[in-house]
Amino acid sequence: MAQKIISISTRGQGLYEFTAEAASFVRANGAAEGLLTVFVRHTSCSLLIQENADPDVRTDLDVFFRRLVPPSSDPSMHWIVHTTEGADDMPAHIKAALTQVSIGIPIIGGRLALGTWQGIYLFEHRDRPHRREIVLHLSA
């Protein structure tokens, strides 16, 4: 068993890949078989495993979620009560609730068992830059 906390600095809403950092952690701990659990310690961002070959996929996902859950200043979101932290805060919590804050990835042959085009992403839902902490937990 091994653990590590990594930090990702975001520049606002969007997807931030950290597959290389997770793979490096697995290699450094020499696990041939096991499970990597990835957990984000925040309520206004989430985690995704998604395509990492075509950047248009990240753009389309970001636009889709912005349209699905617009800022609380949008007339369609007039029902939102929690607005003290800005128009993007409650929508960020909703987006995080629709996605996930923890992902399990099998380790096979000392490597993450991701598909050819899969990458691990922090999905930032806030407009302002943030420093996000991600816990990597390796069970071998």
Image (cartoon, grey):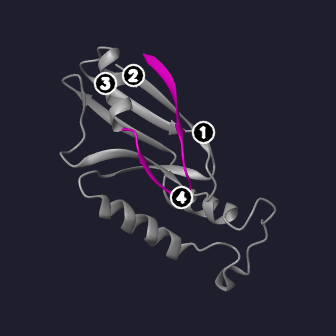
Circles 2, 3 touching at the beta carbon (< 8 Å): yes
Q: Which residue is mark 4?
A: 13
Q: CA distance from mark 1 to mark 2?
A: 19 Å
Q: Earlier in the sequence, mark 1 or mark 3?
A: 3
Q: In the image, is residue 25 part of the stretch drawn in magenta?
A: no
Q: Amino acid at mark 2?
A: Ser
Task: Please name the residue shown 31% across and 24% down the image.
Answer: 34
Closest to the observer, 48 or 10: 10
* Mark 1 residue element: loop
The C terminus sits in image quarter: top left
Which SS class for mark 4? loop
Q: Earlier in the sequence, mark 1 or mark 2?
A: 1
Cα–Cα gap, marks 1 and 4: 17 Å
- Identify the residue under disc 2: 139
The part of the chain drawn in magenta is 1-18
Mark 3 nearby-residue class (10 Å; few <14, some 14–19, many ≥20)? some
Q: Which residue is mark 1?
A: 41
Taking depth in this image into account, of 9 and 95 the one nearest to the observer is 9
Residue ID at (28%, 51%): 52
Pointer 1 with pointer 3, Cβ within 8 A: no
Label 3: which secondary element: strand
Q: Position of residue 66 (x, y in %)?
A: 52, 71
Q: Residue at x 48, y 20 (%)?
A: 3
Q: Which corner quadrant of the image does residue 61 belong to?
A: bottom left
Q: Is residue 6 magenta?
A: yes
Q: How would you rate the neighbour count of disc 4 (Cα within 10 Å): few for under 14, some for 14-19, many for 20 or more?
A: many
